[in-house]
Amino acid sequence: MRKVLAVDIDDVLAGSTDAIRKIANNKTGHNLTLEHYKVSGPYWGYYEHVMISNGIKSKATHQEVIDEWTQTHHISEPITGAIDALKVLSDRYKIILITARDPKIREDTEEWLQKHFSGMYDDLHVIGNFKVVDKPKTKGEICKQIGASWLIDDNPEHCMTAMAHGIDTILFGEYGWHFDAPEHLERCRNWQEVLEYFDGR
Ligand SMILES: [Mg+2]
């Protein structure tokens, strides 16, 4: 039986931060670059943090940016290397996608996945997060429930909840919210490194 590999969507398969960056620029006339999103800050509230430190201080604008993003997920580009890597990995593992997106946007999410990752995953869990769901399950709990051996996620918190259930995790990417992430987390900066991690396993 194929082992289960759980994979996050935002900033792992989908270039969500980049989409948010573009929306923020369009809305405010600023020209925030990728480098502006490489500063240290906590995961929750990270985009607000970047906007505030670059002079975009209006809470209403922050909300508009996030709202526009939730309504326009289809504009996100796949992360570099994600499609090729998931093709390879889905031959060897059962791929189950787990996202903390709002369950209300499940359909949009599925549409986007079908467009870019069709046939490369076995199931999708849209679990929500504390902002949109009362007491959402943790990714660790879902990983345990589905019998995952690994979780690939850019959010250190999700990696930690999975590790608490004995699941191996990979902190994916090089994001601003990784600066203060626990040192002991296994990290892969990109999909090439993920493939190398799974090589020979
Ligand atoms: Mg994510």
Image (tube, rainbow, N blue to C red):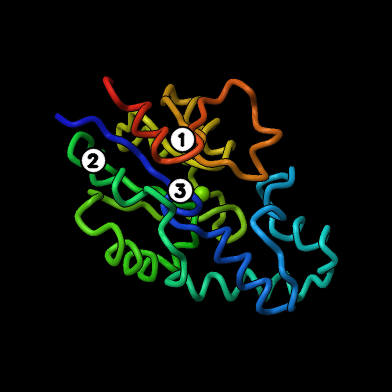
Say whether marks 1 and 3 touch (CB < 8 Å). no
Q: Amino acid at mark 1?
A: Gly
Residue on which the image places disc 2: 88
What residue is shown at x 23% (from left), y 35% (from top)?
93
The answer to whether residue 45 shows anywhere in this view is no
Q: Position of residue 38 (x, y in %)?
A: 68, 48
Residue on which the image places disc 3: 12
Tell me if mark 2 has few (under 14), some (14-19) or many (20+) residues whose alpha carbon lies within 10 angstroms of its own.
few
Q: Closest to the observer: 166 or 201?
A: 201
What residue is shown at x 75% (from left), y 57% (from top)?
50
Label 2: element kind: helix
> Could you say which quadrant of the image residue 168 lies in?
top left
Label 1: element kind: helix
Residue on which the image places disc 1: 140
Q: Amino acid at mark 2?
A: Val
Tell me if mark 3 has few (under 14), some (14-19) or many (20+) residues whose alpha carbon lies within 10 angstroms of its own.
many
Q: Is residue 153 above or below residue 51?
A: above
